[in-house]
Image (cartoon, grey):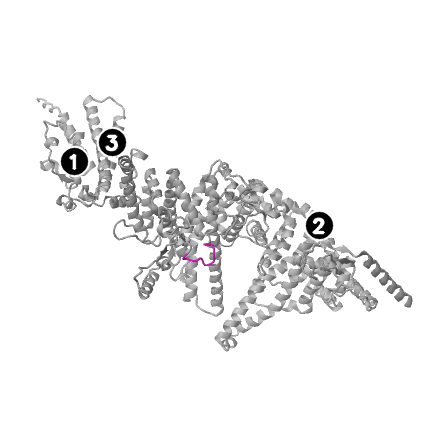
Amino acid sequence: PPSSPNPPPADPLAKLRRKKTLLLRKVLLATFGDASSDRTPSCVHLTLDDDDIYNVVKSPSGVQVRHVAELLAARLSLSPSSRSLEAMPPQTKLGLIAYLGGCHKRAGEELKELRSKSNGGGKKRKDDESAEKELCGILEEIRNQVVSYAASSLMVPDLFELGSDAPLQLAKCLSTTSTDPASSITFDMLGKNSSFYYCVCEELHSQDDESFGTVIADVVKHITDSLSKCNSLLDEGSNEGVTGNGLLLTSALRELCTNKKAAVTLAKMPSFLLPPANTPQANEQVHSYPPEASQQQINLMRMMQSMRGEGGPVDYIRRSGPGLERETVLGLVLRLGMPADHASVRSSFSNPATRSKKDVAQITDGFRRQLELYHSKCNELMKQLVVAGEESRKRVIQWLIDALLLNVNADGTRPDKTKVSCEELLINLSVVLLKLCEPFINDPKKALLVDPGFVSSPESHGGIYDLTGDNALPRLGENVTDTAVTYSPKNSFIPLCFFFCSRSLALTVVPGGSRYDDIARSVYHLHRTIRQQSGDLRSDPRFNRYLQIQYAKEIIMMSPTYITDVFRYYNMTAGIFLQMDKEQLKTMPEHMVDDMCSVLVYASSFAVKLLSGVDFGNLFRLTVKLLSKDCAHLVRNYNLRAKLGDVLHDVFLPGNSENPSEIPASVTCDPLAGGQPYLTSDKLSKETLAPSLLLLYGEVENTGFYEKVNHRTKIAALLKFLWESPEHKPAFKRITEDKKSFITFANGIVNEMNDKFASVMETLPAIRTVQLQMANPQEWAAISEEERETITARHTSNERDVQRALPLCNSVMKMLGFLNTDKDIRNTFLLPEMCHRLANMLLHVLTKLVGSRGLDLKVDNPESYNFRPKEMLQDLCVVFSSFAAANEFQIECAKSGFYTPDLMNKSVKTCSKQGLLVGESMELFELLATKVEDASKVMMSDEELYHDTPDEFLDPLMQEFMADPVLLPTSGNVVDRKTITQHLLNDDTDPFNRKKLSIDDVVPAVELKEKMKLWLDAKRAARDQAS
């Protein structure tokens, strides 16, 4: 058969024309031409005045570069009501700016693809190369022209009817970037600095800097106007203009600042900062409600806001915390969060007492995910403003200074809302500052760039770390001045971020932990009270409201991301402090150490799981260092020193079968020491911690009445752990070398037992009486409601007092037992100023346990009070046994007003019968009873010697014959040495005139002592002669 003819060769020009037409449809979403094939439903059909584009003769290859501007002009000149636009699918009905941005993006994608094919290798025909070059030229022209038209429309909004609100359109495009990345105008396939938005900014700036500033200011205003209508992350902004929630609006500002010139312009806007201090504008009063509104209208508006969970606004002066959050760009951004009183948060946790833990966890995690996404946008926005340039950075720093100075009182229990910013702003500020610190938190070498001189440079810190005035911050050392340190940092921004972050955390997470503690305690006590009264937790409105607040607080206060970042920051801070010499360390703000302690103690109580996997080594080492005698002058605040002890107990004390702990081993143990506890492996700990804790035990006497009990219980537990650790034995051996410190410690033990145990043994019967009342429904119901409330309140208070005091009493008795197994320590307790007090205290406790039938005292659930009378009697008798052979102890027991032969004999029988003591301990206790009875008989026979003692031989305070008379130089009085020594342990003044006095000042009354000896010898000789 004959072969078919070859097809005619394709017209290369026709092929190129077709390619161009299809390319323009795809990029510009527009068609042109008279043929029906030139139209498509997905594109706007344009009618052009110039027929060059259609004319094959004039334009053999179709559309040329010169035609791009005309095509775009025709598309942009359409009226918003044009039928051409009305008939188009939704995706083509875009605003002018969004349309131009889309064209720019699509042109970039096509251009990248063409270039990729062109660079793909292989030999190409000249016609194909020429065609690709033409197509690339058209695409590049489109990108240039859309940028030019966009810039013109933004500068002259009435240039095109479709662009009459071009700045608003740009704001909308920026806000949709995070929800629709595919249409983002800030991202481009061809590179970082080739996006539509970036190019428009550069074009605007090159044409007219002033117009560029106006455009950016308009865009920012549209975004912030909508942002100001959000009261939380859960709220939508304006229904008109730029729509979306706080996250989208914050994202819009973040996208705006991807161009550095735009970021600088934003930072230079008047609304970026508050008016300077001491200006008329700064003191202007701002009214939250319209001036013409009546009080009735204001009340109605407040009620509506309360129903929506917004909280009523307050009047404020312009330069204030509320002014910062409502009138500055960064304030409007950072003020959002998940407020506990917001309607949506409350409704999410509605009926909390009926919810499962899993349900609450799911809701909380959902809120946290939203917060973390929002925080990431805030972090990016702040970083962009900081890196945009020196001018922008200075404005950001000034805003940070204003934020920290104006909110200096935000750490109060109930901050004044007319003066300080909302809690959400301050928390978000701390998140942002933690993020700025991240590079040197992760890199110890960069952390070395934190120059401590920053806090001594008012020009750098802007008044945040002032040493004088109402807002002065105490330092660790004394006599610190701003001139003490020269500040010349290698990097000025790193110290600024570090110290500003510290102040921010002091105003947020630290008081936040305290407030959460208060809420948790309220929930606990309400739960207990309702249960005791047989109430229904599920239906109790007050309990459910407090539980709602607790769950809402946990969104941020137990956020793994946030709290872990706080831990890492403070461990880095401790590392920096450890590198400082003493002169530098003494200039550091005291609150920084206090805050570290507060956060760790909070976490050990409520956020134990968040401690896992974090390095706390520097915090441990700094705590031990600051407690050591070498650094005692740096931490002069007794409450802070007590907190350091709490940290060692709550965070670093390993658990055991007797005292289990939830703290992970990764926290208490040092991975660099083979997983051994920090307490036993750290060199400084082994050398100094035991004597430091003994000193601290006495020092906490100066803390609060209830607080010192908790502190001492913890110190006693630490000492027990150290005593049982061979690594600390040498340190305990050295303890008695510092006699003054040890006597102070021993005196604290005796004081505590005397005060607390007597109180406990008086309170326990009252607790038992109420327990029996409540257990009898008829008797309890017969009491009036008012009286029941009074009894319950007193009962709760009694239980709380006993639960505080008994653990300390138990710990003290055990501590006396193990400490006095050491001969040197035992001899210190036998010193005249301590021996009689020790004997009195031990016999006092023995009287309460045995003489008052304390062993028979019963209460419901005694373990909840740590009430273990038999165990305490056993520990007590062990202590007695350890001193049984000491003659001075036997004598002091015999002299005690609590001693009776029956008491000792009954105690011996009880211990034997109950099996509390066995072997040598039992024998020594029996021996002691015999020896004390013998000493008592000798004393009774000596009493006749003293019946006519001259007054000058009697202690004027105790009215007892003096053993070692000394002269007080401050008043001229003579007293017994043991009397004044004991007095000075609790009061450093002369008891006769309150002048300052120390034991080193007293002068031995040698002549009087000799005179007394001669008199007593004569009396004894006369008695012996008579007998």
Amino acid on which the number 1 mark rests in the picture: Leu
Whichever of labels 1 and 2 marks the residue nearer the N terminus, that label is 1
Which residue is label 1 attached to?
Answer: 71
Which residue is label 2 attached to?
Answer: 736
In the image, is residue 631 part of the stretch drawn in magenta?
no
The residue tagged with tag 1: helix, strand or loop?
helix
Query: What residue do we see at 37% from left, 54% from top?
Result: 284
Which residue is label 3 attached to?
Answer: 111
Amino acid on which the number 2 mark rests in the picture: Thr
Query: What residue do we see at 18% from left, 40% from top?
Result: 76
- The N terminus lies in which quarter of the figure? top left
Q: Nearer the viewer, mark 2 or mark 3?
A: 2
Q: Nearer the viewer, mark 3 or mark 1?
A: 1
The residue tagged with tag 2: helix, strand or loop?
loop
Residue 422 sits above or below residue 142 on the image: below
Amino acid on which the number 3 mark rests in the picture: Leu
Whichever of labels 2 and 3 marks the residue nearer the N terminus, that label is 3
Label 3 to label 1: alpha-carbon separation: 19 Å
- On the question of residue 880 being in view, the answer is no
- Label 3: how many Cα within 10 Å (few below 14, some 14–19, many 20+): many
| Quarter-of-image position of residue 863 | bottom right
Q: Nearer the viewer, residue 954 or 969?
A: 969
| Quarter-of-image position of residue 68 | top left
The magenta region covers 409-418
Q: Is residue 634 left or right of residue 217?
A: right
